[in-house]
Amino acid sequence: MTTRTALAALAILLAGAAGSTAARAETIRVAATPGPHAQILEAAKPVAAAKGLDIKIVEFSDYVIPNQALDAGEIEANSFQHQPYLDAQKADRGYAIESVATTVNFPMGIYSSKWKSWAEVPDGATVAIQNDPTNGGRTLLLLQEKGIIKLRDGVGFKPTILDIVDNPKKLRIIELEAAQTPRALADVDAAGINTNYAVSAGLDPVKDPILREDASGPYVNVIAVRSADKDKPWVKTLVEAYRSPEVKAFIDKQFKGSVLTSW
């Protein structure tokens, strides 16, 4: 075989290998809420692409549809919720979905556009919380953690307004969809706001809360997939790409302490 013939044969082999790699590339749809969750997935996309996985990000503006879409097979995974919320959704709706990895923690904050500190909040003030049991309960637990209200014993992670047994400041607590809580700041004295919605609204989750949840606790977010898919190779690739050094560096630089990695 001549040198020219050998080089031609090698070129054909390399082209075939490249075509084979492209053919093996797999596309998955991953749901996220706008803001940090979607931004972090954007940072994971090139890492996943280098491993042969194409991530298509599908954004939903609420906390209900991403699990409905996952269970229905309209997407392959989602990344927007913590484990207590996922557990509650599965118990309430019978979803056959489960977490495959922990991701990041967004410490919950209580914000106000009227008062610079909680000490200024008057008796009888109106406080907005989320209307889903897990996130609304999380805000109530934060108020209890700071000594503002007392909840009945044994409420777990999903207390409701009915579980308040002591409310010395006579706070008026109202419930809104989680995505609406930042917009309510002009109409209430304070509001519990999830970090992703706070960031989307231009709030600083480190400096702006008048009360802030401790970083430790059960509210680390997760990647969820259908139970039937949990052992598929693309799941491992997705998790490795998300929990990569490149994504960790992006989170640390981009969010400056408002989002904490679990790895």
Image (spheres, grey):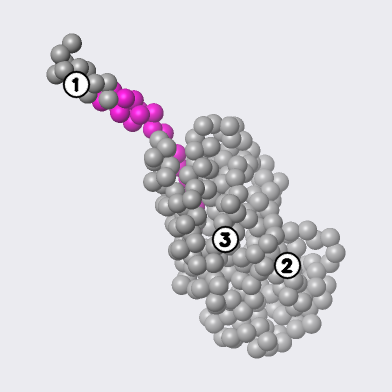
Q: Which residue is mark 3?
A: 260
| 41, above or below 173, in the image | above
The numbered dot on residue 141 is 2
Identify which amino acid the numbered label 2 is placed on: Leu
Q: Residues within 10 Å of mark 2 (few under 14, many from 20)?
A: many
Q: CA distance from mark 3 to mark 1?
A: 51 Å
Q: Is residue 179 left or right of residue 46?
A: right
Q: CA distance from mark 1 to mark 2?
A: 69 Å
87 or 163, nearer to the observer? 87
* Snapshot quadrant of residue 52: top left
CB under 8 Å between callouts 2 and 3?
no
Q: Residues within 10 Å of mark 3 (few under 14, many from 20)?
A: some
Identify which amino acid the numbered label 1 is placed on: Leu
Q: Earlier in the sequence, mark 1 or mark 2?
A: 1
CB under 8 Å between callouts 3 and 1?
no
Mark 1 or 2, which is nearer the eye? 1
Q: Earlier in the sequence, mark 2 or mark 3?
A: 2
Give the magenta-colored segment's residue range: 15-33
Identify which amino acid the numbered label 3 is placed on: Leu
| 172, above or below 24, in the image | below
